[in-house]
């Protein structure tokens, strides 16, 4: 169905893909993008189709298995009057001995096991086929990705060749080569001038910014130097104050010692006076 829907026009387009019969050669990159998109859609479609088919197959197998029904075993009746309907159906065709009943039961069980094994094998085969199909589509997607890179490189090469061919064609034209070359030179020179002007402007801005930063650093350094000087002066003043305080403390201690000596002398003199007074 997919082959019938593709048509003959796509085959013709694929044959004409790398034949530049016109001035504008087809761009392979866009074609490869469309192709990869189609492959991705195909991958999703196949995944859904295989999933639904697998589900239907499993459902049909399950229904077939259910139609076989469980194994019927003889059982006792709820009363003592005899056996159930299954056992009565067995005895309608004639009486069977106990060995034949056991063989029938074993044959029924073996048939059920074979059917279950066939179902499992079929499900395994379907799952393996699904995995192989999906793996093939994934590999095709990877190869198309590599082919896309090659096509992009080829498009770039074709564009470069077209540009080179155009330049050679312009250089070979005799009646108007100078004007085109001069125009191209003027454009190139103008572009270079603009780039040079932008570069100089950026350099000027950078230099101004650097000068501004240097001035700020100098001001900060000067401020730090002044602070260090002030701190040094304060430290000297504090040291001088400490020396003065120590000197004053020593003087006070000396005065205190002299005062204590004078006090002792006064006390001694007072005691002497009191003694003399008592004697009088």
Image (spheres, rainbow, N blue to C red):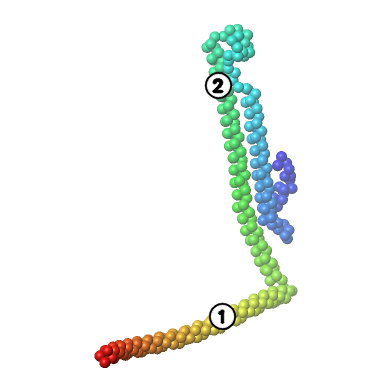
Q: Nearer the viewer, mark 1 or mark 2?
A: 1
| Location of residue 190 in the rendering, given as x and y in whole percent from the top left corner | 68, 77
Figure quadrant of residue 269: bottom left
Residue at image point 63% right, 29% down = 62
Q: Nearer the viewer, residue 57 or 169?
A: 57
Residue 5: assigned label? none
Q: Is residue 118 left or right of residue 248?
A: right
Q: Which residue is mark 2?
A: 110
Question: Is label 2 in a helix, a strand or a loop?
Answer: helix
Residue wearing tag 1: 213
Q: Residue at x 66, y 44 (%)?
A: 44
Choose top left, top right, bottom left or bottom right for residue 235: bottom left
Dot placed on the residue nearer the N-terminal end, 1 or 2: 2
Q: Label 1, secondary structure: give it.
A: helix
- Taking 234 as reference, is 78 left or right? right
Residue 138's spot in the image, x, y percent?
A: 61, 46
Residue 72 sits above or below residue 51 on the image? above
Left or right, residue 23 beside residue 231: right
Q: Nearer the viewer, residue 224 or 14?
A: 224
């Amino acid at each position: 169905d997919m082959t019938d829907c593709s048509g003959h026009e796509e085959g013709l387009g694929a044959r004409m893909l790398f034949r530049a019969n016109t001035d504008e050669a087809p761009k392979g990159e866009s074609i490869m993008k469309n192709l990869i998109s189609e492959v991705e859609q195909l991958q999703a479609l196949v995944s859904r189709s295989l999933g639904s088919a697998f589900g239907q197959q499993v459902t049909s197998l399950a229904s077939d298995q259910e139609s076989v029904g469980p194994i019927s075993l003889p059982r006792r009746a709820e009363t003592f009057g005899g056996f159930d309907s299954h056992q009565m159906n067995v005895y309608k065709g004639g009486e069977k001995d106990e060995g034949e009943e056991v063989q029938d039961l074993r044959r029924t069980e073996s048939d059920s096991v074979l059917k279950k094994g066939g179902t499992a094998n079929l499900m395994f085969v379907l799952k393996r086929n699904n995995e192989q199909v999906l793996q093939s589509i994934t590999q095709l997607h990877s190869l198309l990705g590599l082919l896309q890179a090659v096509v992009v490189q080829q498009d770039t090469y074709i564009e470069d060749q077209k540009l080179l061919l155009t330049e050679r064609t312009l250089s070979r034209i005799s009646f108007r080569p100078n004007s085109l070359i001069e125009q191209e030179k003027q454009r190139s020179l103008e572009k270079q001038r603009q780039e040079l002007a932008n570069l100089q402007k950026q350099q000027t801005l950078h230099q101004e910014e650097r000068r501004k930063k240097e001035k700020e650093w100098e001001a900060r350094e000067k401020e730090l130097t002044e602070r260090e000087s002030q701190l040094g002066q304060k430290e000297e003043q504090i040291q001088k104050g400490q020396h003065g305080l120590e000197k004053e403390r020593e003087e006070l201690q000396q005065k205190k010692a002299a005062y204590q000596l004078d006090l002792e002398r006064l006390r001694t003199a007072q005691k002497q006076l009191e003694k003399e007074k008592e004697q009088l």
